[in-house]
């Protein structure tokens, strides 16, 4: 792996941790506290949600850009069994992206979702956990070599020692 690929991978991981971490924070900390505390100004709640939405939005942009880059780099080197898990992950990512957008976008079209924020944040948090588990599975498949195509002899000679 070259340095550029490593930086892209780390930006991807940090963006996912940020987006899913903020969602888990809302699910496990913010929403339960807001339910218990009386007299929290609605402006404060909206300001927190707006700020979280902006951070999650930036994270999503980075996730999409780096994810597409990773897809272009990885897909030619893997077997069909990897594609099956990757397809499931991408499908769940699309669902999570929609939920995140609906929770943070000030549109009347998403009013029903925003009214049931706790339920949708819970779903988003669990989806984030499943997506991370699928990502770890994909990485392990590559690390163990069960998803890698055999490399042509010319590429094997260019690999540093200790590489698959």
Image (spheres, rainbow, N blue to C red):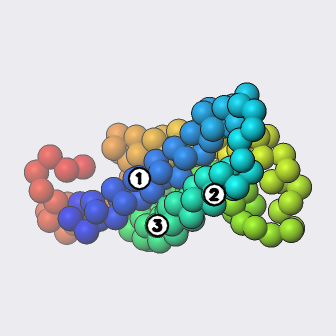
Using the rendered image of the protein, determine whether residue 105 is visible from the camera's viewpoint.
yes
Other-residue count near label 1 (Cα within 10 Å), few / some / many at <14 / 14–19 / ≥20: some
Which of marks 2 and 1 precedes in the sequence?
A: 1
Secondary element under disc 2, as helix, strand or loop, is: helix
| Residue 9 in the image: above or below residue 143 | below
Quarter placement of the N terminus: bottom left
Task: Tell me what residue is drawn at x 73 percent, y 28 percent.
Answer: 36
Residue 78: x and y in percent read: 43, 57
Other-residue count near label 3 (Cα within 10 Å), few / some / many at <14 / 14–19 / ≥20: some
* Pointer 3 residue: 62
Residue 90: x and y in percent read: 61, 57
Task: Tell me what residue is drawn at x 47 percent, y 71 percent.
Answer: 65
* Pointer 2 residue: 47
Q: Which is nearer the eye, 21 or 139?
A: 21
* Pointer 1 residue: 13
Q: Quadrant of residue 149?
A: bottom left
Extreme residue toward the left, this view: 161
Q: Which is nearer the eye, 4 or 31?
A: 31
């Amino acid at each position: 792996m070259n340095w550029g690929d490593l930086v892209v991978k780390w930006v991807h991981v940090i963006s996912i941790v940020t987006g899913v971490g903020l969602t888990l924070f809302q699910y496990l900390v913010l929403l339960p506290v807001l339910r218990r505390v009386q007299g929290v100004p609605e402006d404060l709640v909206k300001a927190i949600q707006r700020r979280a939405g902006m951070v999650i939005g930036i994270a999503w942009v980075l996730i999409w850009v780096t994810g597409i880059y990773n897809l272009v780099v990885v897909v030619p080197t893997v077997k069909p069994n990897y594609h099956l898990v990757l397809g499931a992950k991408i499908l769940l990512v699309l669902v999570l992206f929609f939920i995140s957008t609906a929770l943070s976008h000030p549109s009347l079209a998403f009013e029903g979702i925003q009214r049931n924020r706790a339920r949708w944040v819970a779903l988003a948090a669990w989806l984030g956990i499943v997506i991370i588990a699928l990502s770890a599975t994909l990485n392990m498949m590559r690390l163990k070599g069960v998803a890698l195509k055999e490399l042509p002899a010319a590429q094997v000679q260019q690999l540093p020692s200790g590489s698959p």
